[in-house]
Image: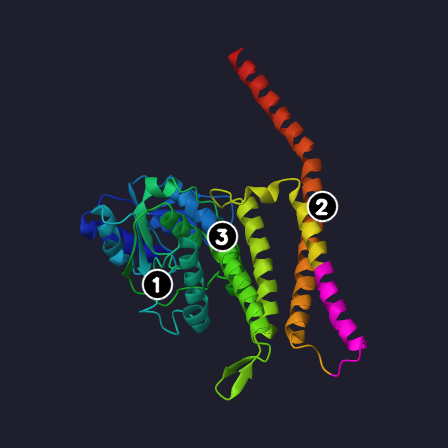
Amino acid sequence: MGLCVREAVTALADAGWAGEVVVVDNGSTDGSREVASAAGARVVREERRGYGSALLAGFEAARGDIVVMADADFTYDLSKMGLLIGPVARDEADLVIGARLDAATRRSMPLLHRFVGTPALTFLVARACGRRVVTDSQSGFRAFRRDRMAALGLRSSGMELASEMLVRAARAGLRVTEVQAGYRERIGSSKLETFTDGRRHVQLILLLAPDLLLVLPGAVLFAFGLALAGLGFLRPSGVAIGSLRWQPVFFSGIATVLGVQALLAGMVLANRSSVAVPPRFAFVGRPEFPGRCLAGGLVAILAGLAADFVLFLGWVGGRASPPVHGLGLASLAQSLIIVGGTLASFGIVSRALMARDRAAAPASDAVAEERDQGTTALRKASSA
């Protein structure tokens, strides 16, 4: 801690910048507060736990127009702050990321993080932004203008704040760029929980951009499944691929079912997400939506059973082999039954959740009214 603070103070002095070093403490018990203060930092207390909570408190406490954020574990070379601050100070960028991967080693970054976790999260962040923004979305070494970052309404309390900041900045039209800033071996133990923090990142990204990550891929997969089903009817003997013969009907059902599930999940998340702006697919929240899902599911199930019944009649009739389109019809029947079951169960669950929300609404309104009345009474008492 003290080493990082002194490195930052020296970097500011050498560059001739008027600034301060702010350290946010949210529950340390190892004397970090005292060490940071003695090294020249202003220490801010934050009661809420979590990486994101500490950073948001630091952003709010900062007094300068440009803020540089970094972990106090020596991994980031704070003497290179000028590389990040320069583009922001020259108004060439609103947010600058200090990339780590080119300088990362087995000692400074686990192989799982370097070659799997960070690239995977960077890919998802790029999908949520609509384009590739940076190569290292998880770097915690960043510089930005404080007012523009405050306008984004960041709210994540954990490590996923890194992804939220990038997605919201890119979608708000802020200029995001990246510089190579190196990466050193950590001093002390890491607080990163690989799978838990990774799950929270993915969950946040899905909530921020369900239309890009679920709805669009689901629609494409569903359409692809239908096209393959049609191809199966046109080419009942399969498609020749060299010396092999591929039957598209086997994958058509998988693609259709997965596409419908992704579509449903994406539409619900886009409509009910607490962080996605603006909410999408308003029809999902209407009272008649669960009933339509249930009805559509039952129709699909009955259609699938009818197709199976046609095949059964052919078998009972003594046919030595199934009809020419029998394989395609059987695949279609299976897909209709599974899709119908998915829609019907989704409708039932949606109806139950809506009923619960309606039951909870009066209580919430009563609490809000009581709070407003209490606030009014307090104001009157203060005036008196």
Q: Which circle's residue, 3 or 1, is located before the other in the chain?
A: 1
- At a point 61% along the width and 68% down the height, the residue shown is 253
Residue 250, position in %: x, y? 61, 74
- The amino acid type of the residue labelled 1 equals Thr
Please tell me which residue lies in front, 155 or 10: 155
Residue 271, position in %: x, y? 55, 45
According to the picture, the residue beneath numbered tag 1 turns out to be: 135
- The amino acid type of the residue labelled 2 equals Ala
According to the picture, the residue beneath numbered tag 3 turns out to be: 211
Please tell me which residue lies in front, 214 or 79: 214
Give the Cα separation between the discs numbered 1 and 2: 43 Å
Q: Nearer the viewer, mark 3 or mark 1?
A: 3
Q: Secondary structure at mark 2?
A: helix
Q: Secondary structure at mark 1?
A: loop
Left or right of 9: which side holds 171?
A: right
According to the picture, the residue beneath numbered tag 2 turns out to be: 352
Task: Report the magenta stretch's main SS.
Answer: helix
